[in-house]
Image (tube, rainbow, N blue to C red):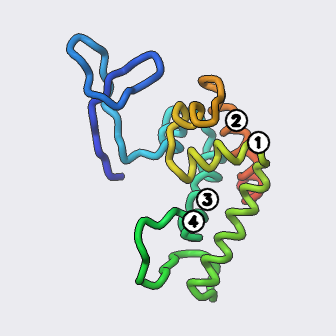
Amino acid sequence: MRQILQERELTVAGPVARPARRGRRSVTVNLAESPLTWLHARGHLSDRQFDAGERLRADWERAALAPGVTMRWEPVRAKGGEPGLAPGERQIAARARFDGAVAAAGPGLADILWRVVCAGEGLPDAERALAWPARSGKLVLGLALDRVAQFYRIG
């Protein structure tokens, strides 16, 4: 796994994206680690929930749903997916799986699911963006990932 380590000041709300001031507590964070991986590594998500999140993120990437910054001139190259399908068909199939998984999570849970798993936002940032109370996102994310695991039939 690639690592981009950076020293951050440790506050009550968690690591803050500024250099630690003299005499303050600090923590080294890996900026290349996804929020989902971070939660799983610290025991906040089960293996089943983590696998469901990774499957959802893979479908999101295969479906090329991330916003494009510039015009893309190269053909879409999607790895994996169903054998015997053309790249465009794999992209359409991944989009259908992604839409089905998000629908299975439900309207109240899809927001935190997309923000953390696909957009890569940390839980505190997602909670603030959704105007949720602090530390409520972990529970809701766990429920959403359980539903997604059920959709993907992850045992």
Q: Quick check: marks 4 and 2 in contact, CB under 8 Å?
A: no
Foreground mark, 3 or 2, reads 2
Q: In the image, what residue type sits under mark 4?
A: Leu
Quote the CA–CA distance across marks 1 and 2: 9 Å
Residue pointed to by mark 3 = 55
Q: Earlier in the sequence, mark 3 or mark 1?
A: 3
Secondary structure beneath dot 1 equals helix
Q: Quick check: marks 3 and 2 in contact, CB under 8 Å?
A: no
Q: Is residue 57 above or below residue 24?
A: below
Quote the CA–CA distance across marks 3 and 1: 20 Å
Q: In the image, what residue type sits under mark 3?
A: Arg
For image coordinates 61% across by 38% down, the residue present is 45
Residue pointed to by mark 4 = 65
Residue 141: x percent and y percent?
A: 66, 39
Residue pointed to by mark 1 = 108
For image coordinates 53% across by 31% down, the residue present is 124
Q: In the image, what residue type sits under mark 2?
A: Val
Q: Quick check: marks 1 and 2 in contact, CB under 8 Å?
A: yes
